[in-house]
């Protein structure tokens, strides 16, 4: 009984000392240092007349302890907020300048942070399912990167690389859409007892995250492969985009393969700003690095940009849509991405690519920005 009275008296003194800080410079008494019974009495005196559960008491003690710990640091907090606001205001322009002036270092930092930061936090928090999926994806793409960086480049490598990343892009998009539908079903609670469970909500959110994260990784990796393969083929050089050898009119400089027979022979051809012309089967030329002529094969559809350079339709779509590059691979002239919105599904795919850029901020630039701010605060003694 005496112990309870002592705890109540101690808690009352702590409350009075805490309330006294509004008019004095003395810090708040930290309730975390009190005994459990004193903490209960402390919380009850802060909220008289309320029936407080153990969880309520824990949250009250944590809140009051936070106030006590930071009491008297208002000037320091104001300075930290000012630095934080300045860094956030400068971040977009800084990243844009970096991407334009030093594209290779920007891309390497971006890819490295996207690949390593999420898996680090997943491993630290024991999310081993994500780590396992990430390892399988990393092993598959390591082999693809190995093929794309070989010199000399195999004749079929560019096409295989673009097909692989096109598949990954479509699969990630399907996972993203599926997760979004699951989330909507849970949001409207279509099936009570299932869609309102914590496991269902967690599954839907993880599915959306997987679709965005692996789609973002594939987009950055295909950009690295594209630059390397283009430089190896010699029709454009990495970084400067200056051609190192003459580009024949019937060669796609993205993959190095021939476009087929000459224009006007009836093959399917897509022209910038125009529509689809009627197509008829025709023979293909041999591949750029040598290959058997297939007289029975139908020429692959091509797409001509506004600058006049022509590419395989699948290659230029992979370059512009999957990698979201808005310049010609050969001459760097600006490309209007709306040329590729031929049906509603293409428009939705472009919206998905835009969503990936927002994902990049949360996965890559937000952790890097917080790390930079932590270093700045430490150097200025604002711990």
Image (cartoon, helix red, strand yellow):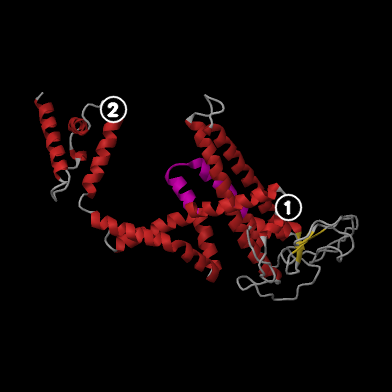
Q: Position of residue 114 (x, y in %)?
A: 51, 54
Give the quarter of the figure containing the N terminus: top left
Residue 309, image x, y percentages: 75, 68
Question: Residue at (23%, 49%) from the top-left corner?
Answer: 70
Q: Is residue 312 above or below residue 192?
A: below
Closer-to-camera residue (253/87): 87
Please indicate whether residue 373 sits to the left or right of residue 217 in the image: left
Q: Is residue 119 magenta?
A: yes
Residue 212 can be seen, yes or no: yes
Give how far across and how far down residue 28 sits, in percent. 17, 45
Neighbor class of circle 2 (other Cα within 10 Å; few <14, some 14-19, many 20+) is few
Q: Crowding near pointer 1: few (<14 within 10 Å), some, many (20+)?
A: few
Residue at the far left in the pictured view: 2
Residue that mark 2 sits on: 53
- From the viewer's perspective, is residue 73 above or below residue 224? above
Magenta residue span? 116-141
Q: Which residue is mark 1?
A: 342
Q: Residue at x 42, y 61 (%)?
A: 89
């Amino acid at each position: 009984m005496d112990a309870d009275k002592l705890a109540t008296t101690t808690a009352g003194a702590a409350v009075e000392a805490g309330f006294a800080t509004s008019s004095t410079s003395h810090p708040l008494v930290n309730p975390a240092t009190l005994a459990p019974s004193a903490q209960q009495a402390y919380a009850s005196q802060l909220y008289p007349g309320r029936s407080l559960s153990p969880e309520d008491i824990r949250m009250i003690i944590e809140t009051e302890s936070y106030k006590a710990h930071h009491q008297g640091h208002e000037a320091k907090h104001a300075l930290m907020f000012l630095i934080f606001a300045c860094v956030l205001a400068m971040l977009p322009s800084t990243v844009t300048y970096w991407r334009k002036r030093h594209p290779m270092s920007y891309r390497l930092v971006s890819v490295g942070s996207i690949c390593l930061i999420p898996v680090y936090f997943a491993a630290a928090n024991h999310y081993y399912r994500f780590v396992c999926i990430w390892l399988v994806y990393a092993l598959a793409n390591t082999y693809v990167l190995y093929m794309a960086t070989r010199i000399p480049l195999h004749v079929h490598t560019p096409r295989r690389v673009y097909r692989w990343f096109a598949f990954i892009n479509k699969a990630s998009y399907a996972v993203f859409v599926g997760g979004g539908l699951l989330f909507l079903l849970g949001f409207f609670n279509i099936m009570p007892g299932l869609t309102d469970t914590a496991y269902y909500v967690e599954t839907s959110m993880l599915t959306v995250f997987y679709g965005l994260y692996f789609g973002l990784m594939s987009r950055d990796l295909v950009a690295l492969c594209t630059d390397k393969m283009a430089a190896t083929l010699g029709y454009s050089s990495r970084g400067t985009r200056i051609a190192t050898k003459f580009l024949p009119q019937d060669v796609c400089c993205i993959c190095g393969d021939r476009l087929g027979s000459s224009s006007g022979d009836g093959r399917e051809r897509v022209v910038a700003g125009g529509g689809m012309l009627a197509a008829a089967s025709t023979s293909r030329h041999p591949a750029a690095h040598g290959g058997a002529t297939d007289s029975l094969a139908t020429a692959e559809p091509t797409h001509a940009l506004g600058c006049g350079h022509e590419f395989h339709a699948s290659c230029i779509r992979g370059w512009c849509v999957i990698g979201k590059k808005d310049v010609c691979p050969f001459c760097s002239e600006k490309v209007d991405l709306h040329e590729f919105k031929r049906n509603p599904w293409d428009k939705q795919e472009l919206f998905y690519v835009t969503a990936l850029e927002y994902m990049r901020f949360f996965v890559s630039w937000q952790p890097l920005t917080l790390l930079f701010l932590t270093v700045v605060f430490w150097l200025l003694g604002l711990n």
